[in-house]
Amino acid sequence: MQIHDFNPGITESGLFWTIPISEDTIKVNFAAGKATFQVSDVDVEDYHDVVNALMDGPEVDAEVSWNIRWSHPLGRTKIRDVENNFAGDFVQNVAQLAWTGKTDTATFVSDPAETSVNEFSLLAHERNGVFFS
């Protein structure tokens, strides 16, 4: 049973669960297969559950913070598909995440990032559509 659903809501255009994030929160060294993505106190809403969120139902103000680190490259792959206008360079690696979410009445804190269990993670630089060349 779900009792919290932290997300930034749905815009008038219908775009959901997406917000702009400052470029300085992301640092990438693709050649080394490493990256970080860290934000603090991002304003979102807690909709209680995904059905209420999708219906844009009642919510309470909330904040989330996270720190994701990608490191320890395990392998690299290049794909170029001219027929479908797609190309990409991919680095499989290890990712670790720490996350916090809070409302006025509750705070949720993940275990430390170093305790993360990584099943699969990937850094990618891809080009498609009008950006394909």
Image: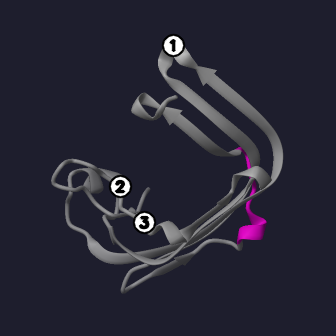
From this view, report whether residue 16 is shown above or below residue 19.
above
Q: Crowding at label 2, few (<14), some or many (≥20) Cα neighbours within 10 Å?
A: some
Which SS class for mark 2?
A: loop
Residue 91 horizontal side relative to residue 58, left or right: right
Q: Is residue 13 magenta?
A: no
Residue 24 drawn at (x, y percent): 52, 71
Question: What residue is rendered at 30% in x and 52% in y?
Answer: 16
Q: Circle 2 sits on which residue?
A: 17
Q: Circle 1 sits on which residue?
A: 83
From this view, report whether residue 72 is shown above or below residue 119.
below
Q: Crowding at label 3, few (<14), some or many (≥20) Cα neighbours within 10 Å?
A: few
In which quadrant is the N terminus drawn? bottom left
Residue 48 drawn at (x, y percent): 34, 64
Tag 3: amino acid: Ile
Mark 2 to mark 3 CA distance (whole Å)? 12 Å
Residue 10 location, quadrant? bottom left
Which SS class for mark 3?
A: loop
